[in-house]
Amino acid sequence: MTLLLDEMYERNKDRKNGLFTVSVFFDETSKTNMIYTPSQDEIKTCLEGVLEEMIRTVRDVGRIINHPNYDNVMKKRFIPDIEEIIRGGFNIKGSREYIYVLEEIREKVTKDFAIAEKHVDSKFNECREISEKCRVWDLVAYEGEDHTISEIREFHNQLRQWEENIHRYLSETKKGIIWIEGSK
């Protein structure tokens, strides 16, 4: 379990990407809210599931106790209660280490999500107006209208400026364990 924490806190290496890719969308029902997919709660649930699977895996290794060389090889390498853990008699979820690791995971996700949300609020909102205009813009209606060369040039310049803003403000970035997906 501590290896999972080491990976989350990048204690062993300098990770270039986050552990979780999060897509960010403008909430069309609000002028300020964003939609995160997966959400903070979904990531927490996923990591809690990883802990559950780790416990299940350890418990499923029960046959190793019956191996003739278990006493000579395995018993000397593990904590004294390994037999009890493998047989399921020990309540891992009640242990101090499990509770500590679970709380550390939850705090890390909460902290990194707060940092990611702060980044998104400062950058992505610069493009909210572009998103709204693109959502309601109608190409067929635009093509059906008469436009002067000057109006077409102005519109083209506006599109170029929007594209520059999208690349500037919606770039992909890492915030802790969160990889914020930017423009594509």
Image (cartoon, helix red, strand yellow):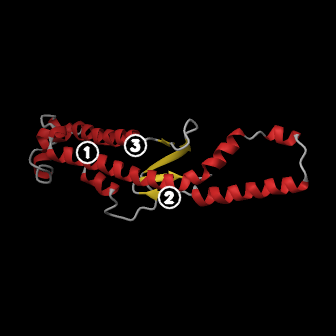
- The mark nearer the N terminus, 1 or 2, is 1
User: Is the residue 72 above or below the residue 60 in the image?
Assistant: below
The three-letter amino acid code for the residue at tag 2 is Thr
Q: Is residue 180 visible?
A: yes
Q: Secondary structure at mark 1?
A: helix
Other residues around mark 3 within 10 Å, as few (<14) / some (14–19) / many (≥20): some
Using residue 123 as the reference point, say whether residue 4 is left or right of it: left
- Which residue is at a point 66% across and 49% down the rendered structure image? 130
- Which residue is at a point 30% across and 51% down the rendered structure image? 4
Place of residue 170 in the rendered image (x, y in percent of width and height, measured from the top left): 58, 55
Circle 3 is placed at which residue position? 40
- The mark nearer the N terminus, 3 or 2, is 3
Circle 2 is placed at which residue position? 173
Disc 3 and disc 2: Cα gap in Å? 17 Å
Other residues around mark 1 within 10 Å, as few (<14) / some (14–19) / many (≥20): some
Q: Secondary structure at mark 2?
A: strand
User: Is the residue 25 above or below the residue 168 in the image?
Assistant: above
Circle 1 is placed at which residue position? 102
Place of residue 16 in the rendered image (x, y in percent of width and height, measured from the top left): 45, 62
Marks 1 and 3 in Cβ contact (< 8 Å): no
